[in-house]
Image (tube, rainbow, N blue to C red):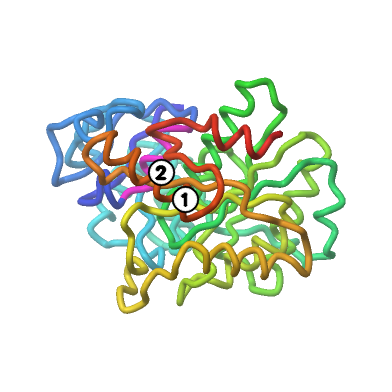
Amino acid sequence: MQIAILAHEKFPDRAKTALGVLRYADYDVEAVLDRDSAGSRVQDHVPDVQDAPVVAGMDDVGDVDALLIGIAPIGGGFDESWRGDVRTALENGCDVISGLHFFLAEDEEFAELADENDCELWDVRKPHDELTVSEGVAGDVDAEVILTVGTDCSVGKMTVSMELARDAREAGYDAAVIPTGQTGIMIEGWGNPIDRVVSDFTAGAVEEMILEKGDEHDYLFVEGQGSIVHPAYSAVTCGILHGSMADQLVLCHEAGKEAIHGYESFEIPSIQAYVDLYEDLAEPVSDATITAGALNTSHLADDEAARRAVDEYVEELGAPASDVIRFGTDDLLEALLE
């Protein structure tokens, strides 16, 4: 499928959905929409993902099958400055894929245009209607369940899950991803959007996916969400932790991070505090331990500084760790799959 990605004024630093799709999805990306960076190319900003021109809007895009909204703002709202591009896409017969909490299919203008032009509006964050409470049986599957957890939002949990699963498969292991967020669902083409699920059904929505794939694969890498200390999103984190009944945890962190993004009055606790919190919270339902760590060093300029940061994180964590983009996953997979 040929697509354009909407990432206005956020690419690349605050457009993690766009980056995830560019790095891992099977889509052919024809253009990225960003008014501020129009005239450049994706690889001028991020060298290790699929390349495409960066343009000002849909009027500058050729024939594509779909427009994908590649921004996941806090709260998941729709910015009215995007309306013109979505309208143009629908008028041109393009489907629109959105991971927002704002459902495009419930917008009267978009719904009418989609109907008139035979387009699909795929609201990725809309859960299906048959979700139930957890039965506490995810631990019965044959697969080893490995969950990425974080010290904050946007520290790399989805990226780490994708990298570990891909590299495990390349090494000959039978591994799959369990997608729990909009970006993972867009990449994998299925999944439950956990942060949109009714609270009582959160663990059950994760359990449902574990049961669906758990006897088909040897390893399941579950995409984590939020952080157990996050003042807004901790409930989602806990639901995934208990619903997955994970066997092992990978703690994801951003080098040098001192406060919760968007909630800077809340300081990041020590790494040991996170280890204790996650393992103690998991203990009543599973024997999950933090077996490895992943450190996001993307903001550090050179590999030498990044390597020092990783070494410090290994010492603080007391477990193997790596920046999976910069230095690969070998040390993590050796610990997780042994």
Residue 49 location (% of width, % of height): 35, 29
| Quadrant in the picture for the C terminus | top right
Q: Name the amino acid type tagged 1.
A: Glu
Quadrant in the picture for residue 80: bottom left
Q: Secondary structure at mark 2?
A: helix
Can you say whether 86 is above or below 165 in the image?
A: below
Query: On the picture, is 60 further left or further right than 6?
Result: left
Quadrant in the picture for residue 176: top right
Query: On the picture, is 273 further left or further right than 285?
Result: left
Q: Secondary structure at mark 1?
A: helix
Residue stretch rendered in magenta on the structure: 15-24
**Residue 191 appears in the picture as rendered:** no
As rendered, which of 217 and 266 lies closer to the eye? 266
Dominant secondary structure of the residues highlighted in magenta in the image: helix
Q: Residue at x 45, y 67 (%)?
A: 270
The reply to whether callout 2 and callout 1 are in contact (CB within 8 Å) is yes
Q: Which mark is on residue 315?
A: 1
Query: On the picture, is 249 further left or further right than 96?
Result: right
Q: Which mark is on residue 311?
A: 2
Q: Residue at x 21, y 39 (%)?
A: 301
Residue 272 location (% of width, % of height): 52, 64
